[in-house]
Amino acid sequence: MTELVRVAHTAALESSFNQRSSSSSSTSAPDLFRQPEPSVGQEDHVCDVTPQVLLDMAAIYAGIHQKLKSPQTSWSDKLKLAQFAWASSQCILPNKEQVLLDWTAHALSCYYNKKIKVPLEVVEQLWTYLDDVLNSKKLSNVLSQGKNITLNPALSQIINERILEGTTGMLSISLSTVLSCCHGILTSPVLSVCYTARYNLLVDLLVRICSLACFQLRQHESSEPLRLKVFEVLFLILSTYLTIQKQQGNTNRVFNQVTEHLLQPLCLLRHLLTTRAWTEEDDLRIRQHLNKDIRCKVDLILQSALFFHDRLPYYKEEVLPLERGSGAKKGSASNMYVCPVATILSKLVHGHGDDKETLFYAVRCNSLPLLFKFALDSFCKEEENKLLCFHIMTKFVTTLDFTEDLSIKETFNTANWSLVLLSLENILNSCLAGDIYNVAADRIHHKEVQLHFYRKVARLLFNNAQTDIPAWYRCLKTLLTLNHQILEPDLDELISLAWVDADNFELRVKKARETLMCAVIQTYAKLRQLPRLFEELLVVVCRPAADELRQELLPEAVQKTLSQCLLDNPPSQNLEICRLILKKMPNVREMRNESALKLFFLSILLHAVIFNLKTLDDSTPVPTVRQTQSLMEEMLKFVRSLLQCLEGILIADTPWGEKIQESTLLLTHTWHEADALFQIHCSKYKSPVGTNHEMSPVCDTIEKVLARTGSAGKVSSPLSRLLQKLLALQRMKKHLLVSPNAETKSILFETAQYVVNRQEPLIHMSSDQTWDLQLCSVNSDTYSVAYWFVVTTNLPLIAPYLSQEDASYIADTMLNSLLQSDFRSNLEKTDRSIFLISKQLLESMVLCELSQLHSAVVTSITKRVFEVLCASDVPSFLKSSTEFDVESVGKEEHIADFSPSLRRLKSIAQEVMNCVETGVSIIVSETQVSHLLKLVKITSVLNPHAMSPEDYLELFLCSFLMNVCVQRDGNGALSVPISLLEDLFKLMALLLMRQNSYIVLKVVHGSTLLEAAMTSVSSCFSKGLFCSVDSPAWFPFLQSVQGFIQCLIQLIIIQKSSVRINLEKFANFMIERVALDGTSSGNSGEYEEALNVQLHLATMSTLCKELMPILGKIKQLDETLTQLLGKIVSIMGPAIQAVLTGKTGSILRQSFFVDVVTVMIKSELAKASHQTEHIVEGNGKDKISHMGFYKSFGQQILKELCPAPRPMDFLNSSIHYLSAFYLAAESNKELDLKDLHFTILQSVHTLFSGTWMSISEVKELEAPVKDMLAQLMGNCSKEQFHLLFLLLRDGLVASKVGGGCHTEVLASLTLIKLLACCSLPDTCSKAFWLTVPQILSSLVFIIRESSEVASLTSALTVPAVETLTTLLRQGESWLSNPHHVITGLGALHFVPLDSQSMDDYYSAFLAIHEALFAIILCYPKVMLKSAPTFLNCFYRLVTSIIHEGRQKGEKEREKDSGTFLKCAMLVERMYTHIGKTADGFTFLSSFIVAQYVSELQRVTLQPEIKAHLTEGIYCILDSCAEQDIKFLNRTLQMGVKEVFRELYKNYVHYHKSQRQGEEKYTA
């Protein structure tokens, strides 16, 4: 097509040229033009022509040149002529490329200089023509041959001007064309000279393209997306400029150009790229790649131009005080070079209009931290330059519209505080990272100049507090990290603004504030000055303030930090803190509203401190114990005074009484808990109230407080109510410590009842309210959660003293909370909610230990079920056990053995069975179904082992009743009830597998349950409930039915509960049901009929599966079981054949029918094997009754096994079927057994060779194929084995790997691996292992070939290594030649460990490790002989995991850490095994250690990975002798030697001493 277009275009040019040309030279043109065009590959080939023709052609094209220059020729003709001259390979115009480029550049120059007038469309065409020429392959080929072409200097200026017009929107031509021309020039080293040779012009181009990019980035309102071409050309220009800038010898010139022309545009560009809110419309290449690359180039340009190391003296002269004072002043001409900082900052501050003030202030704030970071990177490498960097930083900070004294200027716009603080934060963080502030050096050498400046920054922040901006807190945190003395004078202000009086609780602000306060606490804890911090905190807390507006004093993050710091703090300081708080407590007698609020905050603080102290024990020094006792006495006096005051307040009910009440109860609770803890753990501690806690005045007052709950002084505060319950629990604990008596037990029961308090108004029980476990955050919203947390966490204490009503209340509350939320939801919250607390209680072992409460939960569940269902059909459920006496049961056998509760349950069971017989149907709505589903899911979490037999049976019968009687209403969706039935069958199966299951068979016969279950499911068909069930919903339900039947039959057999009668009765029931459904099949639809038959087949196949294992174990049952198997198989055969030949067979799952027929075969085989003991030989043909059907079924499976993708469940079932079918054929002594043997193996090989089979699917099929091979190869002949080997041999060809037939190779490898694990006849086994050396050689070539294709790593390379490993393991006694093992070892070097996929990487890593482990385990002598090869292979694993396990970004680490951790554990395992190998291996231990430390020295490993590798290498160091350690210390290089010394030091300290200690006590 290209040639045709070219010829047509040439003809058009000929015609146009002939009509308009009058010169004589043009008359001969048509003859030349009609010469045939060269082929595509010969475009630039010069034709062989005579000298005369060449002369004629020269004359012709000299005319072309004249025509291009002639003013008489129209511009359209000139363009056509130029296009023809460029396109035609026969145009041999001398220096054609130069001529045409010069003509185009001249034409554009004349137009833009207004020397000629050209139509706009012609100008557009000229640019298009220039673009085509500059980006053509022809020009590229010419330049690559070394031809010199120069561009008109005016062209580069024209391009610069057009880009500028594109920025202003005045460009009259296509911007893309201009950018493409620029791109074509700069990508060619020859053409780009027009820019690179003129530095100023290149700078101008960069300024223009930056302006264009900024213009596009600032058009937020425009719907037009960013142009990719603009940013591609921008990146190209930046790269070109950076190269030229580095080549400039005059750094002053570079600095001048960048500051004068480039600094503002580049900073603006970087700011817009950084702050842009990218959208989906923006090109992905700009968002992800060019954005980052452009910013990187900008950074390199600015850093290398502004902070070049040769300019260091100028910076010193400008900013360092001594240098500036002693140095001579320069003239104004050199001012720019002498004052680089001032020059840079002036360009950032000035040079823009007032209309852009806001934008450029943001650019300034964004650029200053970046420029300061560049200064640090360039100058801060030497220690002596750190003061210089500090003074540069001070200049940068003042540029943020601050004065020299760091106060805000009058021109400062307060709306910019957010930008200023972010900029200041980044600058301070750079100071911290650059380590430019040495506190000691600043004090000794520089008169604390840095400290004074940072103090000014701190005062600036406090004088203009911006507590609504997170960066304000982060700036203070950085100052604190630099030196705590910076904030020390303003510590009270810091605590007030950022802690006590904080009033902004927006999430980001709150997080930044809490981070700052945690840092303050940690800093003062490290300085051992926590009392100093608390002094300031108490001063702030006790200031007059609007306390009612104050939020919680100790948020969770601050509480945790304080707790950790108090644990590490000296006990004397902690006690001092407590005393400080006690001293600040207000006077009880002068209590007012404000004092009450102060008291509350101080009580919270004291509670937090005391609850986080390290408790006293017998090792605590006596002075500390005495100080603690003194503190407890002081606190007790204060608590007593508060309690006395509290008695009056409860009656007076003053407005501030609530806070006093809360404070009193909190301090009382705190004192009691601490006192009890100290007494328990420290025998030296003597309680201030003595040992007889019952007579304590404090306890007496508590008794009064608890007794007043129902009086006029009723406690209304949520926190007070919660604290009362905690005090009540404390009272229980104290009473439990004394000897029990009647009075004590009465108190315990009363207190437990008070804690639970069934009348508690839980108004927020249904909400998702959470609580952070802090007492100060308990309010009317969180009280319900706090109350429920206190009750559930103290259940072991109060449960023995709860009444039945209290236990039921707790169970009902728990059930309500679980039902009101999604039980399957996973809440990853640190805070507690009622639902989460209830869920944890339900799943905990605590509930199992509390029998009364567990029973109450079961009772509550069953009660809820019967509330949903109609209990009138089961009246016995409504009766209590006492109503069932002996006479009401009737004349049943062994009735005396039944307790009243069992009599009641037996009556319930009988009524449930009656419901099934009478066809009772309980209609439920969709809402009720949802409710029942939640109840079933909750029940499935309960532990049946913890249930009493009565609870267990009641729950089982309740589940069974739901299963057999619940139906949907007319409008309900069917998928909901079938899921309910599925869950119910699973629940009943789960219950039947537990220890109490025997009780079920005591009240109802097993066969009765089975028949009732099948009757209820069958009734669903008769009522048309399954007519719209889809396959995804039906088959899980069918499996749940099978699971229930299986568990119940197993229970009957295990319990020996009338096994013969129950099994016979159920089998006959199913046979009759099948026959009955067969006669009435016309009454229902085909699909529903197929489902019904499928249900019957599933039931009977499950029955057969359970009958087969007990055949022959109980002789009395053998005859019955044999008859039952025969009956069931005889009824299953016709049934399944009818379904398969019907229309509905294709719509049901194939694997199901395969499984059923497999069970039929196994049943017949079991029956036949039992009968052969009693039948005379010769009746073999009659052993398998449906052999013809099995044969045709097997042939169909073999046909469907390979051609196309099949479901995995079908493939699994088919392989199981083929195994059973072959056994049947073998048992039946079929004539074509040999052919069947090979056909099956060939089909499996073809299946594995299928291109649609993934490697994971092949792995999934390995287990059933292995079982099948064991069946087929157990008695195979030599001929059969030979045929199999010929089949496998064809796949072991390395050339097939590259030929696209790697699946054939995989099939052979898989079968060989499985065959090696099979038990073969002696002759076949010998033949196989004699051939294994050849197989190993083939495996080496296959691994080498496949390792070159990255996509085949997991698909072929790893399976080949796994086959190699299996052969080495299984051939331990066969492979006597070491060469064969070494051959396999050599193959491991080819396995790639550089895969992009984590799955591929781990599979390859594991495969190599397992192969090495097989060698070291099975062939230790071979490994010792080939130790270097073995270690080199293992060294690949070590190097790989060290490289991959290095510290990376947070996202990468989270994504891949699990895989790398498993690899590290494998390496540790190998190191450990090498260390325990034969002593002959120890001579290479030092080499192993040297390799490890050499790699370790290059990277920083993730801690968890390093831990495993270190433990492994310690095992190698165990085998290193002393001379090995000396050798390593002598020979290792310096950096590696330091790593080794650190490793060996830790080895001696942690590992060696522990090992020697273990050896000391080892026999």
Image: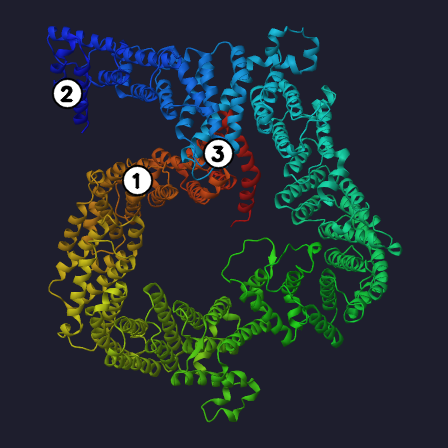
Q: What kind of residue is marked 2?
A: Glu
Confirm whether residue 757 shows in the render. yes
For badge 1, the amino acid type reads: Ser
- For disc 3, the marked residue is 1521
Question: Could you tell me how far apart the alpha carbons at marks 3 and 2 are, in whole angstroms?
Answer: 83 Å
* SS for callout 1: helix
Q: In which quarter of the image is the N terminus?
A: top left
Can residue 1225 be seen here?
no
Look at the picture and state if 468 lies above or below 824. above
Question: Considering only order in the chain, which callout, 1 or 2, is on the residue closer to the N terminus?
Answer: 2
Cβ atoms at labels 3 and 1 below 8 Å apart: no
Which mark's residue is nearer the viewer, 2 or 1? 2
Compared across the picture, whether 988 is left or right of 123 comes to right
Cα–Cα gap, marks 3 and 1: 45 Å
Disc sitting over residue 1351 in the figure:
1
Circle 3 packing at 10 Å, graded few (<14), some (14-19), many (20+), is some
* Residue 333, position as x, y percentages in the image: 60, 7
Q: In this view, does 184 lie to the left or right of 1519?
A: left
Picture coordinates of residue 581, whole percent (x, y): 80, 48
Which one is earlier in the sequence, the residue at label 3 or at label 1?
A: 1
Work out whether mark 3 precedes mark 2 in sequence or the reverse, and give the earlier one: 2
